[in-house]
Each structure stands twice: as C-alpha cells, then as structure tokens.
Amino acid sequence: MALLVLRDDFYASGKPGPADTLLVVEVANSTLAFDRDRKGPMYAKAGIPEYWIVDVAHDVVPVYTDPGPDGYRSASTARAGDTLAPGLLPEVTFAVTDILGPG
Amino acid sequence: MAVATITTTSGAPTPHRFTVDEWHELGRLGFFHEEARVELIEGEIFDMPPIGDRHAACVAHLNRLAVTTTGDDAVVWVQNPIRPSYYSEPEPDLALLAFRDDFYASGKPLPADTLLVVEVANSSLPFDRDRKGPMYAKAGIPEYWIVDLAHDVVLVFTDPGPDGYQTSSTARPGDVLVPRALPQVTFAVAEILGPGCPGGRAGG
C-alpha cells in the first residue's frame, strides 16, 4: 500500500514518483529480508519519506524514516497497542492492532 | 509432497494442471522471484502484464468508491488472491467479499464468500472475458465486471452457470452500477473510468 499526494486524475497520466509518495507500506511474511534489505534501501535512495513493513511473522511494524543514499537513518518498532501516523499525514492514524488483525 | 496427476483415456500426454496446494508449495520453495507477478488460472500459470498508468488509476478509483460506500457491509479486496476452485487462485483488481471479522486471515475467500469481482482491462480484455469470465462463472461467483479502458465502458456479467455467465450488459459514463449482492453500494461509471474519458469526471 502507498499513500500518495492527491491528484484529480489519480495518476492516470503517469505513475507516482518519489515526490508524490508520502508513505509506502509492505506486508511481509517470508519476504521480510527482501522487503527490509532490498526494497528499504531502494525506497530510501529515492527519497521516499517513510516506509513501514508489517511483519506478520513477529506481529510488529518496523518504521523507517529519514531517507538517505545509504538507507533510512531512523528506525523504530511499533507493536500492538501503538498508533501509527505518517509524518506527512499526521491526521491519518493506524492502530497497529487493527493492521495486524484479530489473533 | 504428492503431486496430483491427470491421465486421459487415450493415454496421450496432457499438460500438468497445477492445484492451489502445488501453487503454494512453489511459493514456499521460492520458485518464483519475490517480485514476479503470476496467477494460477485453471491449473495454468500465467504472467500478469505490467500495470499501465490508467489501469493503476482505475484501481485507485475503484478502491476509493468501494471503501467509501461499503463500510462494514463487505471486505474490500484489492489485487489479493481469491480461490474460485482447486485449480485457480487469481488476484482480481477488486473483489467485494462477505464481511468476516478476521478479514480472511484464516483462509482465502471461496466462491460463497465472493460477492463481486472486478477486473480492469486494456489489452487483456479477451483474456479477462474469455478465460477468467468462465472460470468465475463456473465457480458460481454471482457478478463479474470488466472495466474496458480501451472503450470506456464497463461490461457486466451475471447469472453464472457451468458454461459461463448467462446475462451480460454494458454500462457507460452516466450510468450507476450497483452489485446485486450489495444494493447499498454504488459505483458511478464515470468515476470508475476517471477524468479524461468521454463523460469521465474526477473523483469528488
């Protein structure tokens, strides 16, 4: 999932670039290493401001911010009970418990 | 793991028909690259074509329309797998599923759970109509829409049977589509197609 700057044409005239992309979220089970170590640096190098991985195997959401050429410089881990809000959309809230679902 | 085989009475070789169990075993083995976009349709594995810009925008419109009008009446399922049969696990652009508290975490949606399937088609229209349509109909999925981007219409198929959908119609900008199983959910065709098509409007 990604959250993009609103455009009237919903990007019909061209795919979103880094400047349009406010948040990227990947859901990972067996792909955690790929999502963290391959996709993470790719998104950071592009300057995408925030990247979350929903780690369904461990029921946590690693949160990456401060993109740089060598990857995201800040990382934290959100758990059930926490509420996440993208830095660029602070009014949009995600309860980690709701993301991970019941069970 | 035992692999299912099918033999014909003539003894002539037939292509192996993959089951969903074999499909998932291939996934566990890492057979396909993480980024590969592949679908299992009636036992055959197909590469999904890259998503064009207008296709992507249309999926975003469908998602927005579905979420804003569906509420908790259904689960909105975007490009996630469903299981119409033991030999198929497509990933339709949008599906509306019977609401379940766990959002199908415990098992993929089966035909009885699937209220509506929508595919967005440009060059893939023949495949979406002539291969996926019969697959969805045989499974008994009650309603199937194809957003035909090349012609700016939505094809509507209902009354599923073993030989395909028995009823079809065409919806155009200005029309409003309502899934039979969810009469409170409305999709304005002009909004599905987005601005830039004849009669299209931006999402409000």
Image (cartoon, coloured by chain):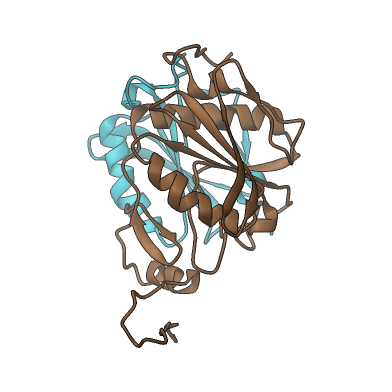
Q: Is residue B201 left or right of residue B43?
A: right
Provide residue B141's location: percent of width, then percent of height: 63, 52
Q: Is residue A87 visible?
A: no
Tell me the quarter of the picture where residue A32 sits. Answer: bottom left
At x 40% / y 47%, what residue is drawn? B127
Provide residue A70's location: percent of width, then percent of height: 23, 40
At x 65% / y 56%, what residue is drawn? B140
Examine the rendered structure and indicate whether residue B86 appears above or below residue A49. Answer: below
Provide residue A72's location: percent of width, then percent of height: 33, 38
At x 55% / y 30%, what residue is drawn? B62
Front residue of B34/A8: it is A8
Chain shown in brown = B
Q: Is residue B137 left or right of residue B7?
A: right
| Quarter of the figure with the C terminus of chain A | bottom right
Chain shown in cyan = A
Tell me the quarter of the picture where residue B22 sits. Answer: bottom left
Front residue of A28/B34: it is B34
Provide residue B202's location: percent of width, then percent of height: 51, 13
Residue occupying the far left of the picture: A69
Examine the rendered structure and indicate whether residue B91 appears above or below residue A58. Answer: above
At x 35% / y 37%, what residue is drawn? B51
Q: Is residue B179 left or right of residue B53?
A: right
The mark tally for this picture is 0
Q: Is residue A64 visible?
A: yes
